[in-house]
Image: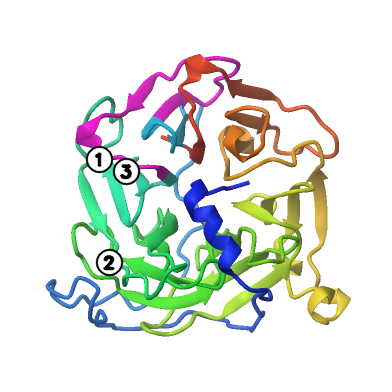
Amino acid sequence: MKHFPIGVALLFLFLTACSGGGGGTTTGVIPQSVTPSSGMGNEAQPLVEAQSDAVQQPQPQYTPSTNDLLYVGNAGNNTITVYHHDAQAAAAPIRVIAGANTGITAPGQLSEDAQGNLYVVNLPKEILVFAKGANGNVKPLRTLNVNLPPPAAPGLLDRISAMTVDQRTGKIYVAGTTGPVGESSTLYRFPPNASGNTPPFASGTINYWPTQLANDSTGNNLIYDNGPVCCAAATFGVQTVVKQFYQGTSPASLYSVEALESSGIADDPTTKTYLVTSNIGILRLAENTVGNGPMNGYPLSLTPRLISTITSDTCGGQLGLGYLRNIYVIHEKLAGCSSDAVYVYTHDSSGNVSPLRVLSGSATKLDQPDGIYEGQ
């Protein structure tokens, strides 16, 4: 599961019990022309956004190939390690992005644009963008400063928790936690190639603390999941939020489901399912049946249809789909897993199955892995 630095994790002790997010219904796409809110890099000129994110082609735009690479962000040694997609055992990385020039600090979620540029969550509130093929002690192409409001009181956070790039439009989506841990976050939509103090097109409040953001198969929505929510460690939320939300609003969840503690999510566009890591295994949920379950008193017909579960992997954190739709899953020793590792499963894995392969060992240079991406 996705875990945060020990000092951050201790903040959970200050929280009171809270409940999962509701599942209002929102459909369609919201056309808009917006002006950035104050305090969000307001020295920049107002930006006007394209009218619609209406889907032109399925997500993602990039088609996996045999030349795909595996990127891992290591919070323990402030590096991005790069491997061939089929690396296993104690294989050494083929490239390592590391050093003072990189500016990398506790890297989190990774993403990529259509040109193969690598986007890195850099704590506490930056997005670093590295050129395709970056290696060694190199400077990023650009840095996006996510100007989150400062914490209002002890026990509040001011940091990025998740990020993804829409390969079709180039827009950058960032979730930043500015309220009590586990209660609320802010979702930002930035223009393509944003850098410095570029203001977002829009920002809005969403439920709880996303641990991973992803594009769903329609191209119109984002999906995210929540880690341990407040004091109820047995609940989490899988949320689907429309991408084209108004500035200053709270984007309503298209869907919401409570299940077990989770910290990783991905969309499988081929099967139209969500893959979710949890403490009972890696769940595959049918997209078209996700809704509020009976835990909140809603009808049983709206509960998610569970397609399958990889019951042998109960320690997974962030995950991603890669070459041949193989499932790549982060394991972190500091979080209670047997080792720092990447576990790989075939796309149709189910039950108490062994992984297709495991990448682990000192030669891999994995160190508290916390972000993973398989791409160009």
Mark number displayed over residue 115: 3
* Amino acid bearing label 2: Asn
Query: What residue do we see at 36% from left, 50% from top?
Result: 123
Kindly state the secondary structure of the residue where label 3 is placed: loop
- What residue is disc 1 on? 103
Q: Nearer the viewer, residue 266 or 263?
A: 263
Look at the image and tell me in which quarter the C terminus lies.
Answer: top left
Q: Is residue 124 left or right of residue 239?
A: left
Query: What residue do we see at 42% from left, 65% from top?
Result: 157
Query: What residue do we see at 17% from left, 75% from top?
Result: 42
Image position, residue 335 (x, y; %): 61, 40
Camera-side mark, 1 or 3: 1
Q: Is residue 231 left or right of residue 240?
A: right
Image position, residue 273 (x, y; %): 69, 55
* Amino acid bearing label 1: Gly
* Amino acid bearing label 3: Gln
